[in-house]
Image (cartoon, grey):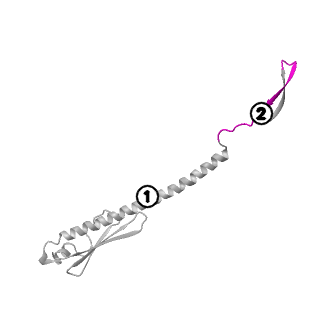
Amino acid sequence: MLKMLRHSYLGSQNLDILTVSTPRIRSGFTLIEMMLAMAIFAFVLVGWMSVMLHSFRLVQHSDMRIEAVNEAQTVMNLIRSANTDPDNFPEIVTNAFPAGVLSPARDTLPGQVVTISYQNTNPLTVTVAVQYTENNGRTQTETLSTLLSNF
C-alpha cells in the first residue's frame, strides 16, 4: 500500500515523500489461541489422570488379591506339614487345624478371616478361604482347595 506523507523540515520547506507500508508481521499468540491451547491441555490432563487413578486402584486390588492367595497357600502348607502320621490320617490333620475360622488369625490384610473346611476322609479335601476387606469397603474371598491322602 502506497501512502503520501508530507514532512516539513525546519518548518520552511514541505517535502512530499512516497512511502510503502507493509503489513505488520505478528509474532506470538493471541489470548484466544492461548486459552484454547490451555483448554485442550487441561482436557487431556484430566483424561490422563483418570486413567492413572484407575490403574492405581487396579494395582491395589491385584496386590491384595495376591496377598490373599499367598496367605491361603501358607495355611495350606501348614496343614500339609501336619500330615506326619499315616496311621492317624485324617485325624492328625483335622486335630492340628480344626475346621472353622483359623485362630489365632494372621492379620496380613484388612478385615482378614481365614476359614478351613474339610470334606471326605481319604483323600481329604481341604479348602482354605481367605476373606478380606478392600479399601473401598467391599468384601472379597479367595479360595484354595487341595486333596490330602495318607502317603
Quadrant the C terminus occupies: bottom left
Q: Quadrant of residue 4?
A: top right
* Residue at 21% from the left image edge and 79% from the top image edge: 123
* Total marks in image: 2
Label 2 and label 1: CA atoms lie apart by 61 Å
Amino acid type, mark 1 = Phe
Quick one: SS at disc 1?
Answer: helix
Q: Residue at x 53, y 57 (%)?
A: 47
Question: Is mark 2 in CB contact (under 8 Å) with mark 1?
Answer: no
In the displayed structure, would residue 43 be above or below residue 71?
A: above
State whether residue 104 appears in this view. Answer: no
Q: Secondary structure at mark 2?
A: loop
Left or right of residue 141: residue 117: left
Where's residue 19, x and y in %?
80, 29
Crowding near pointer 2: few (<14 within 10 Å), some, many (20+)?
few
Query: x and y percent of residue 61 in the render?
Result: 40, 63
Front label number (2 vs 1): 2
- Seen from the viewer's position, the closer of residues 69 and 105 is 69
The residue positioned 46% from the left and 60% from the top of the image is: 54
> In the image shown, does 12 or 64 lie closer to the viewer?
12
Residue at image mark 2: 21
Is 102 magenta? The answer is: no
Inspect the magenta stretch and tell me whether residue 22 lies in it. yes
The magenta segment: 9-28
Mark 2 or mark 1: whose residue is earlier in sequence: 2
Q: Is residue 57 visible?
A: yes
Q: Quadrant of residue 142?
A: bottom left
52 horizontally vs 91: left or right = right
Q: Identify the image quadrant of the N terminus.
A: top right
Residue 66 percent coordinates (x, y): 34, 63
User: Which residue in the structure is indicated by mark 1?
Assistant: 56
